[in-house]
Amino acid sequence: MKDNNDMPGHLARRFQQIAVAVFLAEVGDAGFDLTPVQYAALATIKANPGLDQVTLAGLIAYDRTTITGVIDRLVQKGLAERRASSRDRRARELEITDEGRRTLRKITPAVESAQRIMLRGLSAKEGEELMRLLRKAITAGNELSRAPLRDVQA
Amino acid sequence: MKDNNDMPGHLARRFQQIAVAVFLAEVGDAGFDLTPVQYAALATIKANPGLDQVTLAGLIAYDRTTITGVIDRLVQKGLAERRASSRDRRARELEITDEGRRTLRKITPAVESAQRIMLRGLSAKEGEELMRLLRKAITAGNELSRAPLRDVQA
DNA sequence: CGATATTGCTCAGTATGCTGACTATCAGTA
DNA sequence: TACTGATAGTCAGCATACTGAGCAATATCG
């Protein structure tokens, strides 16, 4: 039988498990309480002010049903706002708050540190190669999950 | 600001997301209802009959609190059995059932197919290199998650 | 215009994963 | 043996993720 270590699926799960743990530890040590998912959502809201939830989901490849809860928590923490759109009454426009902007700014060193730590077993060149291969595999498999990546078309 | 595509953590999450979707699709098409986690647990129980839950958790790097529910579901599906240990009354010995063995045997082609599909954007050489780099990063970061990999010492 | 299809969002239900706490048991030691 | 600490397992609570269903609003087309 194939060993777990020959299964890309198992390795993916394990690497992701470590990545999340490192992220939470670094961010927690810096005095913040933000998950990787919440961070990605907040950063994307900041970069695309006024976007709606479906667009946000597409930009970071979340399921739309997951986004609802994530935003609930960002709003509850006072980091983002959810407003009814004037153009489409079904949609909610998302904005980052000043508090959210402050948090993002102060949290950045911890986030970057986390990215380094999760690659600490690899040389710089190997880290780059790992990211390249992951990007390539992800691009090829993009449509295989319920929550594919979707670019915005301006 | 760094793009998501330069964050190993984000790439890890995305690759894992695709891997799980592919696994569930392949296994579901084959007529089975088994998650990646349940599959790994069942295969490990088969390979190590009579092991306890903590040992199982260590072998596949699950948290011990997660294992409880996973085994609940394997037992409920009739694929595994949980027995009190005679040597240590705290521990539960795990066994695979005949039904579990049959399921494992019949499900294997779908599982292997899933592993191929999630690497379909990569050449054989690239797939090998991706797994090598993941293994290396995982080994270096093993102790960073609450559920590190633990080998059995016979 | 009106019927139909599509879209944005939410919700209920299920399955990982984690933190932290708790019980029962075992192991080591004074 | 009594005390102390460690260990196996479970549980409550929270945060992703998904399936599938549903509602309200918009878009499309005859």
Image (tube, coloured by chain):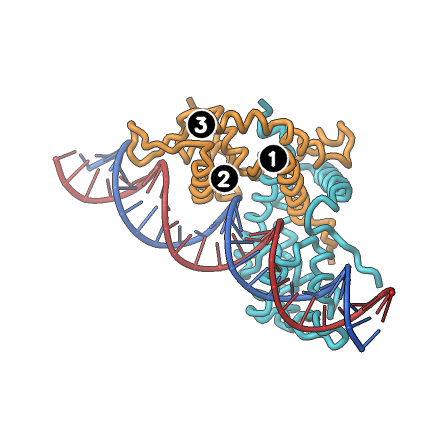
Chain colours: A orange, B cyan, C red, D blue
Q: Is residue A87 above or below residue A9?
A: above
Is there a contact, CB below 8 Å, between mark 3 and mark 1? no
Of the image marks 3 and 1, the number of the one nearer the N terminus = 1
| Residue displayed at 67% across by 70% down | B96
Q: Are marks 1 and 2 on the same chain?
A: yes
Tell me the chain of label 1: A
| Residue displayed at 70% across by 69% down | B91
Q: Quadrant of residue A68?
A: top left
Q: Quadrant of residue B73?
A: bottom right
Residue ID for mark 1: A31
Neighbor class of circle 2 (other Cα within 10 Å; few <14, some 14-19, many 20+) is many
Residue ID for mark 3: A97
* Element under disc 1: loop
Quarter of the rendering occupied by the N terminus of chain A: bottom right
Alpha carbon separation for disc pair 2 and 3: 22 Å
Query: Observer-nearest residue: A10 or C23?
Result: C23
Residue ID for mark 2: A62
Q: Quadrant of residue B47?
A: bottom right
Q: Amino acid at mark 3?
A: Thr
Alpha carbon separation for disc pair 3 and 1: 19 Å
Quarter of the rendering occupied by the C terminus of chain A: top left
| Residue displayed at 42% across by 28% down | A95
Neighbor class of circle 3 (other Cα within 10 Å; few <14, some 14-19, many 20+) is some
Q: Is residue A90 above or below residue B72?
A: above
